[in-house]
Image (tube, grey):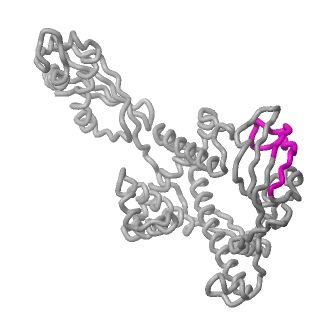
Amino acid sequence: MIKTKLEQPRKTRHKLHVEVSAERAKKSAEAALKEIQKDTEVKGFRKGQAPFDVLRKHMGPTAEKEIAKKIVRDTYIDAIKQENAAPMAEPYVEFEAYKDGEPFIYRAEFDVMPEITVPEYEGLPLEKEKIEVLDVEVEGEVERLRNAMTQIEPADDAELSAGMMALVDFKGTVDGKPFKGSDAENFVVDFGTLMPAFEEKIKGMKKGEERDVTVKYPDDYFNKEIAGKEGAFHVKVKELRRKIVPELNDDFAKTLGKFGNMDEVRKDIKKHITNAKEDFQKRRLGANAIRQLAEKDSFEVPEVMIQNELGAMLEDAVRQIKAQGKNPEEAGLDAKAFVSQHMEDATKRVRGYLIAFAIAKEAEIKVSDEELDARMSVIARQANQTLDKVKAQFAKDDMKERLRSQLLYEKTLDFIVGKAKVKEVKPKKEKK
């Protein structure tokens, strides 16, 4: 038998007081001691044969802790059912020492979902910029394709300059000491992509030539260890190669596939850029809509959800830094400071998620298995994997249901935007 009492110190935080009868506590205690008994050797007794009272004295606090944990495990589910409680995650448990022949008392604190009143979302005012694709954007993509089709040929008699690549060895120091990335062998130099001050010093070098150069690093250089300082390098050019850049003509267009001329290439590029901008605009409209709704209602958010969101935001920040070839420490990322700085943003995000899912429930928005498979197909293409392999990966650790939740969130935002009052405005000019 158990007695329970539920307190609600906060709307999203409940405290459950549990009193387990002496008889039921004894059964759990004996079960815990039997488990300990199996693998415990006590002097004077064969392994697994020590009496419970001797075992408790021998194991001390360890045995008492295992007994208490076993009683909690055996009664917690019944206790929350008795109070119709709905914990969101594992509870924080405090308990008093178990005593033979006496009731066992413990307290469990846990987060619960808040009660959410669906806000008025129809007619929500939103603004979207008229989508424009500039010629410079199209030409930038044309240039990217051109660079991808560029061929390389040996150029042993040439000099290192624009349009050239080189294979070099170098060793460097700052203040007389080497630093991270200060030396390398067989380093590929694509002239025009390195720090201009360094390229100016190695310009004109020939195959087999060695040169000592110095270069001043900018004050805002990403590596704070050498920012604003002068570096000294010994550079040796081992190979020189010339880039053969294709002309932008009809022949080049035909090498790209179904195109007959460069006009067709540019039209196709413009179409893809337009689609990408439309997708981005769609996501931004959804984010703006849910942000407005979240700001209208400041209901309390479960702490566990805020912490989970902060963890996800921190992981995303680390991924972005690593994608730039840096490490979090060099970039000055401090976990504690990050959490403090982003607490309010994380709270708003979680509030937005809860509102969106409440709207989805009211509007009966669901994600079909076909939609789930379609998204996994996209993921498979992006990762260059088979659909079966991706499905197998998502079948683990509830990943499939997390993906379903993500799709449900996206569908709900689209639904909200569809009910909003969207006004088209002119694109904002970027400040020079």
Return the residue nearer the eye: 2 or 149.
149
Q: Residue at x 63, y 52 (%)?
A: 323
The answer to whether residue 301 is above or below residue 140 is above
364 with respect to 73 (left or right): right
Residue 413 % position (x, y): 53, 62
For the magenta stretch, what is the residue range?
208-234
Can residue 83 be seen by looking at this rendering?
Answer: yes
Return the residue nearer the eye: 253 or 107.
253
Residue 429 % position (x, y): 81, 64
Query: Considering the image in quadrants, where does the C terminus appear?
Result: bottom right
131 with respect to 50 (left or right): right
Can residue 51 be seen by looking at this rendering?
Answer: no
Residue 75 found in image quarter: top left
Residue 314 % position (x, y): 57, 43
Q: Residue furthest bottom?
A: 260
The answer to whether residue 130 is above or below residue 1 is below
Q: Residue at x 86, y 53 (%)?
A: 202
268 with respect to 367 (left or right): right
Query: Considering the image in quadrants, where does the N terminus appear?
Result: top left
The answer to whether residue 419 is above or below residue 399 is below
Return the residue nearer the eye: 357 or 239.
239
104 with respect to 303 (left or right): left
